[in-house]
Amino acid sequence: MATSAAEREFFRFLNAFVEPAVRAGLAGPCLIPFGLVVLETTGRRTGTLHRTPLLASLVEDAIIVGTVRRHSHWVQNARANPGVAVWVNGHRREGTAAVLFPGEPAALPAGAGQLVRSLAEHVLARYTALGWSFAVIVPRDAADAPPPGPSAPDPAH
């Protein structure tokens, strides 16, 4: 199913406002384990950096992002280039993404804990069969992550 031009334009318009606020630390998963993050992916054809606001849940040291739009470009980009970055509570963290697809075993990054593995296998897999898309991101800096909470936005952007 192709994405309509109107749908693409709507999300571009929405993301133009949401993305900078989320990168600055607003609406992130801080006091509760879910909220908004910004996922940075590399374009699978162009090599261009793409930023996408997504709902996320923090589970153990992993970040689980998802969408009901299976054909979202971030899904295809993360699958082609699993080296991603994610903005959580105003902090940018680089990591490795594993995109979950229906009927395929979850090949999660090495740092994914047992709870994350169980969720991917027993819960998220069921929703991928209904058209949802999920990615499990294990940050490279999970061991020395900054404390949750807002911080100053990236000065380069």
Image: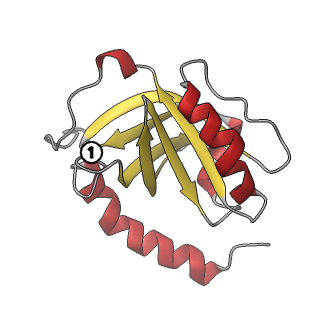
User: Residue 146: percent from the left, percent from the top?
Assistant: 23, 26
Q: Tell which of 150 and 64 is nearer to you.
A: 64
Can you say whether 103 is above or below 85 in the image? below
> In which quadrant of the rendered view does residue 86 lie?
top left
Count of numbered labels shown in the rendering: 1
Q: Is residue 82 visible?
A: no
* Residue that carries the numbered disc 1 in the rendered image: 157
Left or right for 119, reference 20: right
> In which quadrant of the rendered view does residue 14 lie?
bottom left
Left or right for 105, reference 122: right
Q: Residue at x 36, y 66 (%)?
A: 16
Q: Residues within 10 Å of mark 1 (few under 14, many from 20)?
A: few
User: Residue 129: percent from the left, percent from the top?
Assistant: 79, 59
Can you say whether 114 is above or below 116 in the image? above
Type of the residue with mark 1: His
Q: Residue at x 52, y 77 (%)?
A: 9
Can you say whether 69 is above or below 39 in the image? below
Q: Is residue 12 visible?
A: yes
| Outermost residue toward the right in this view | 103
Left or right for 45, reference 52: right
Q: Residue at x 62, y 50 (%)?
A: 134
